[in-house]
Amino acid sequence: MSAIDLNRLGVFRAPPGERETARAGEGAGASRASPPETAADQELENSLAWLIRLRWIAGCGVVVATFAGARLAGLALAERWLYLIGFGILAYNAAFRLVPSRLPGQPLASPVIRQWFARVQIGADWVATAALIHFTGGIDSPAITFYLFHITIASLLLPHDRGFFYVALAPILVGGVAVGEYARLLRHVPFAGGGGYASPAHIGSVLSFFTGSAYAMAYFSMSISRRLRRREGEIAGLYESVRLSTSTLDVPLVLARLTEAVVKALRCQAASIRLLDKAGRLDTVAAHGLSDDYEGKAPMDLGKALVDREVLSGKIVLVADVATDPRVYHPQEVRAEGIKSMLCAPLTGKSGAIGVLRAYGGEDHEFTADDGAFLAAVGAHGAVAIENAQAYDLLRTLDREKSRFVRIVTHELRSPLQVTQNLMAVLRGGYTGPLNERQVDLLERARHRVAFLETLVDDLLDLAAGRTDVLEERPDQGLVCLADALRRVCARFEATCRAKGLSLRFSCSDESVAVWSDEAAIDRLADNLVGNAVKYTRVGGVRVELAREGEAARVVVADTGIGIPAEEQPRLFQEFFRARNAKEVEEHGTGLGLAIVRDLVTRCGGRIAIESAENQGTTVSVLLPLARDDKREG
Amino acid sequence: MATILMIDDDSDIVQATRIPLEANGHEFHAASSGAEGLRQVLAVAPDLIILDVMMETYTSGFHVSLSLRNPSPDSPYAACRRTPILMLTAVHTTTPLRFAPDEDYLPVDAFLEKSAGPEALVSMVEGLLAKSRAPGARP
């Protein structure tokens, strides 16, 4: 018994011809309509199949041991009864194996019925073991130790909270036999002549039963720990694949990481992902461990891809031996790649099956039921990761499309306005002859309105541009020195301030302060803030300050201007909003300046705050995160 | 007096440029596409070229400037390789720092916004002409 690998007893190891019966008969199988409800159900399914295989050995063991003991070693045994027990075990095992498959409606698909099926099997085994104990010496029987590994089997198969109940059943059954014999309700059947310590036959029998039980126990413990370790590896692999595939939104990278995680966790030869393309064909979009030739095969029609078709209907499909499985389309090509077995699970996303996740083994019969469950779990979250990355990709494309559109509109809208300005400037400049006073006045009005329209278009396009390209770093981003940028902007307004009799002061406590942005954005931001301050200040002046504040740069633009009425402050960043007193200063304004500023600040990852009191002044404070060291060094 | 060739497909801006330059005594020629512009360069041998960026395509102005400044000795435009080029643009009204003349990528001498107005235009044209006429200005 110790030569049998627990995993190899699972139906996944059954030769291809037997697989269909095994699936129907034992409720477990490589391909099934719906996966079991939980991991415990899946385990029970596998264990029931394993128990049936183990019982063939037990039944045959009883028959062979009885024959050897009685006929070859000449021991005095209740031969007929023991044969009866042995053949009885084989008979009820055959019933467990065959009856469920003959019943209508696949009763074993239900986990509750599966639980009861397990209880009935274990109950039959315990009764058979009690009979074996009775006919091999009752309380003296060396077979008592068999109960120990029966308890292990029961604890493995049945709900764990009932473990102690099954432990209690064992002494009750053994005690029942002993009490029955003691009370003469049962006839005592002496084992091997009943010689006790003085009989070499008895000693030999006890020793061999004890040794057998000890080996069985050791085998079970080792198998369990081996399975646990494998499961642990799979859980770690699953965690790793989730972590890796969700840590990026780059489609090829997500695919590559998924296949790599599968190969690592299953320790198999290779893995691939085939996704359904628009034409409904399966295209190998990622692979790990496959040759370029094999990976680069043309997309396959679903009509030919029998395995994949089955997988896409939601099944986990195992091809234990690619050479003999009729579903494999090009078995020679697959064998030439060094692949002998395959395990395939569906990639099921929000919109249904999107493709197939495949694991390839270098050995036939390489994959187990647990591997199937693992691959299905990777497939389930992998599909979500793939869909997320694809959705992000689409968004990025749309975003780029939008940017392109904005650029075209920019040109189309600005061009005629600029040309109109130019033509009017030629008129106004007297190049076509002198103008009278009324003509100049009309022309100036027209120029003002066109200039306003130009500003409005610029502002709108800036606002639109700021709200596109948000998903990726813009090409013109770089290190921007704030002190230089602010000085440039202040210089731009010096003449206006002088003309209005205002003071304009710039102070900076840290010249090295730099942010990661684009020069034009910072210029626009500062231009809008200083421009507003200058425009809406009649007396006093404007103060611009730059300081470092922890990991951020603080830019303060303070004025002694008209301020913003308290009740209008909440609407300040709203597009097209202009404060009541601002309209008194300047009739036409776009009301987009602060919305643009807020967008620019947000794009830089910063914050903006405004404090203002009507007729006293306004202080705008902007916090921008400093450029990270790696950007500075880069 | 200088001969100036303007390559631009917008007749309005051509008009807005022609009037102040002719008023300043220059001889003015216009071409409405990149290809026609290149032909006219050979025909009128201008002292200065005013070039639009976007014509048939969004970058045809760039291509014209690259053809004119082609360093190959077989280039048909070798004779006017040193003719100053002023590029008119509406591309970056709000972003004054986006591009600057670059010998390799954008071989032009100066940029001027389309909205700059006649005074700025005339002063920039005179500046470029003076620079190109100065002895040893361009090798």
Image (cartoon, coloured by chain):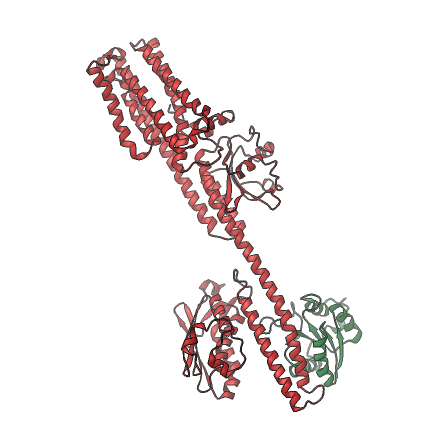
Chain colours: A red, B green
Q: Residue pushed farthest right?
A: B43
Q: Is residue A3 visible?
A: no
The front one of A416 and B121 is A416
Q: Is residue A140 above or below residue A109?
A: above
Front position in the image: A499 or B87:
A499
Res A511 → quadrant:
bottom left
Residue A471 position, x and y percent, is 52, 60
The residue lying at 32 percent from left, 22 percent from top is A212
Q: Residue at x 63, y 78 (%)?
A: B115
Q: Quadrant of the N terminus of chain A?
A: top left
Q: Position of residue A533 (x, y in %)?
A: 47, 80
Q: Residue furthest front?
A: A104
- How far across and down, in percent of the image, does residue B59 sit? 67, 66
Q: How many marks?
A: 0
Instruction: Quadrant for residue A398, please give it.
Output: bottom right
Residue A104 at least partly seen: yes
Residue A169 screen position, x and y as percent: 26, 26
Locate residue A55: give its quadrant.
Answer: top left
The single residue placed furthest to the left in the displayed view is A183
The relative height of residue A347 versus residue B79 in the rendered view (above or below) is: above
**In the visual, does B98 lie left or right of A212?**
right
Closer to us: A206 or A399: A399
Q: Is residue B27 above or below residue A353?
A: below
